[in-house]
Image (cartoon, rainbow, N blue to C red):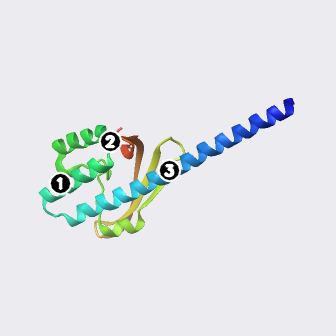
Amino acid sequence: MKTIIYSFIAYITLLSGSSVKAQNDSTDKQAIQMLTEFYTAYNTAWVVHSAPDLLINRLDSLQSKYCTIKLRAILKKEFKKNGFDHDLLLNDQGTDIEHLKTLTVTKDATKSNAYIVSYMVHTTRGYKPIDIKVTIHVTVVKEDGKLKIASTDMSK
């Protein structure tokens, strides 16, 4: 009888562990998709909207949709202080449509709710062309039932 009880407990434990892992995998996939959508739209906004007022409105709209209330407050404070010269969401790197071809988002296995966004920037130093890998560490949380960006490595 004890063997049956122990087997049943082991089975239930195994099932609940599988369920938690499946739920985490699903959340990770959703977060990666959300981050890919956000960084694609955010980088595109910088290229498409050359008029400052249009760019500010588009960036604010994207931040409202994809960032937590707390992060938005930090972003607004930084914008008032530095204008377009400092962007926490891009780690102050330039961007263009070509960069999106190299955009990747992966789960950061060292931290919970953490992801790594990266892409290559093709630029020059002096007369020499170089490639710079932009790496942005972000955390994602649920706010009002939706996944949102809670911080970047520069906004912690």
Q: Residue at x 17, y 48 (%)?
A: 83
Query: In the picture shown, does residue 154 fall above or below 122?
Result: above
**Cα distance between the residues tagged 1 and 3:** 29 Å
User: Could you tell me residue 122's position as x and y percent?
Assistant: 34, 67
Query: In the picture shown, does residue 37 fall above or below 60?
Result: below
Which secondary structure lies at badge 1?
helix
Mark 3: few, some, or many residues within 10 Å (few <14, many ≥20)? some
Horizontal relation, residue 120 to residue 85: left or right = right
Which secondary structure lies at badge 3?
helix
Q: Which residue is mark 1?
A: 57
User: Could you tell me residue 71's position as x and y percent?
Assistant: 30, 40
User: Could you tell me residue 86's position as x and y percent?
Assistant: 24, 49
Horizontal relation, residue 81 to residue 89: left or right = left
Which residue, as the protein is rendered here, is positioned at the far front? 1
Which residue, as the protein is rendered here, is positioned at the far top? 2
User: Mark 3 near mark 2, Cβ–Cβ under 8 Å?
Assistant: no
Locate the N terminus by quadrant.
Answer: top right
In terms of sequence position, does the residue under pointer 1 or pointer 3 come before the other? 3
Q: Quadrant location of residue 120?
A: bottom left
Q: Is residue 134 visible?
A: no
**Cα distance between the residues tagged 1 and 2:** 17 Å
Q: Which residue is mark 3?
A: 28
**Cα distance between the residues tagged 3 and 2:** 18 Å
Q: Which residue is mark 2?
A: 68
Q: Quadrant location of residue 99?
A: bottom left
Question: In the rendered structure, which amino acid carries the disc numbered 1?
Answer: Asn
Question: In the rendered structure, which amino acid carries the disc numbered 3?
Answer: Asp
- Nearer to us in this view, 26 or 49: 26
Question: In the rendered structure, which amino acid carries the disc numbered 2?
Answer: Thr
Q: Is residue 2 visible?
A: yes
Q: Residue at x 24, y 61 (%)?
A: 46
